């Protein structure tokens, strides 16, 4: 537990070709989280960048206030799942104590701290075997997207439900877990790309965890997304069928 009984939140932040924006994004995030009743460790995980991201994140390392510390590391393989996996392994190598949490987010901090404003109350009422997702599908979320951009999301939601029986409406938001739960769930996840968080939530549901979706507000991005659904969608579909073939639909068997 961090000072005064506050939770300690390990934020795992993938960084890929973000040299022009990551310094400003991290500075803005630190300014916002410094007002929250928690301590923070930011784990910047640069993965396979073709720009100067690795050097930039090294300049950000160190204390950033009384309750915030920034860590930086680079790995060769590109992929958000590689970054999440590596970042969490670094967290797991640090001393464990009660009241530690892991947040999987993104380098542009898409929800600002609106997810943390829901996650921290979730931590206070946590009683075990539950994770939280900052969900764009929550009825109280404020998401400004055009109809065409919503179509892939709705299709993917239907595929998750139909192929593996997932009930969580948005498995691609930020994910918040107690450290011990994260350590257990991470051992199950095989994906190292954009499917990582979906597979993690799949295993949470399959093992009988409650998945609580919390409202968020999507903030304007400094730069447009480089994700291309035409490339990502086929890989995610293959991963869904892999889960179905290897483990079946959620509800087919009791929690493992």
Image: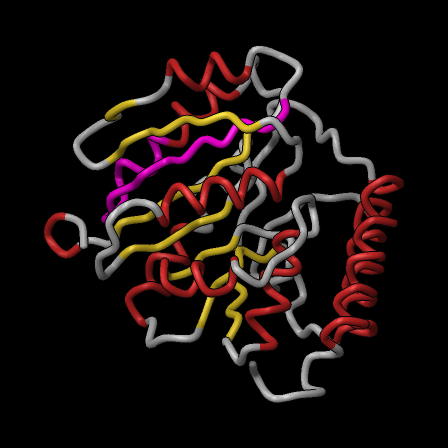
Q: Position of residue 255 (x, y in %)?
A: 57, 83
In the picture shown, does residue 97 fall above or below 227? below
In the displayed structure, does residue 103 sit left or right of residue 208?
A: left
Q: Nearer the viewer, residue 160 or 140?
A: 160
- Which stretch appears magenta? 30-48
In the picture shown, does residue 110 fall above or below 189? above
Which quarter of the figure has residue 7? bottom left
Q: Quadrant of the N terminus?
A: bottom left
Asked if residue 44 lies in the magenta stretch, the reply is yes
In the picture shown, does residue 66 fall above or below 89? above
Q: Nearer the viewer, residue 249 or 132?
A: 249
Q: Residue, x 51% and y 63% (percent of image)? A: 185
Colour scheme employed for the rendering of this structure: secondary structure
Q: Quadrant of the C terminus?
A: bottom right
In the picture shown, does residue 41 fall above or below 237? above
Q: Position of residue 52 (x, y in %)?
A: 56, 11
Q: Position of residue 153 (x, y in %)?
A: 78, 54
Q: Residue, x 87% and y 49% (percent of image)? A: 234
Asked if residue 218 lies in the magenta stretch, the reply is no
In the displayed structure, does residue 21 sit left or right of residue 235?
A: left
Number of numbered discs visible in the structure rendering: 0
Q: Residue, x 64% and y 52% (percent of image)? A: 196
Which quarter of the figure has residue 168? bottom right
Q: Position of residue 132 (x, y in %)?
A: 48, 63
In the displayed structure, does residue 162 sit left or right of residue 173?
A: right
In the displayed structure, does residue 245 sit left or right of residue 187?
A: right
Q: Residue, x 43% and y 59% (percent of image)? A: 183
């Amino acid at each position: 537990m961090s000072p005064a009984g506050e939770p300690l939140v390990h934020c795992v932040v993938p960084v890929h070709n973000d040299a022009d924006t990551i310094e400003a994004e991290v500075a803005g995030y630190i300014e916002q989280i410094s007002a929250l009743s928690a301590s923070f460790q930011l784990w910047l995980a640069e993965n396979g960048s073709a720009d100067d991201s690795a050097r930039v994140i090294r300049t950000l390392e160190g204390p950033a206030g009384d309750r915030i510390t920034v860590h930086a590391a680079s790995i060769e393989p590109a992929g958000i799942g590689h970054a999440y996996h590596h970042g969490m392994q670094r967290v797991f190598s640090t001393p464990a104590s009660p009241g530690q949490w892991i947040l999987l987010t993104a380098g542009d901090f898409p929800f600002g701290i609106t997810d943390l404003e829901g996650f921290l109350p979730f931590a206070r009422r946590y009683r075990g075997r539950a994770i939280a997702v900052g969900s764009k599908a929550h009825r109280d979320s404020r998401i400004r997207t055009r109809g065409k951009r919503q179509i892939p999301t709705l299709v993917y939601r239907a595929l998750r439900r139909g192929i593996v029986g997932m009930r969580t409406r948005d498995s691609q938001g930020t994910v918040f877990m107690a450290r011990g739960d994260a350590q257990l769930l991470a051992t199950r996840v095989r994906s190292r790309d954009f499917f990582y968080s979906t597979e993690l939530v799949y295993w949470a549901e399959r093992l009988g965890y409650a998945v609580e979706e919390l409202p968020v507000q999507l903030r304007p991005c400094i730069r447009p997304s480089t994700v291309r659904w035409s490339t990502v969608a086929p890989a995610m579909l293959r991963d869904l069928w892999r889960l179905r073939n290897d483990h079946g639909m959620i509800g087919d068997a009791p929690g493992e």
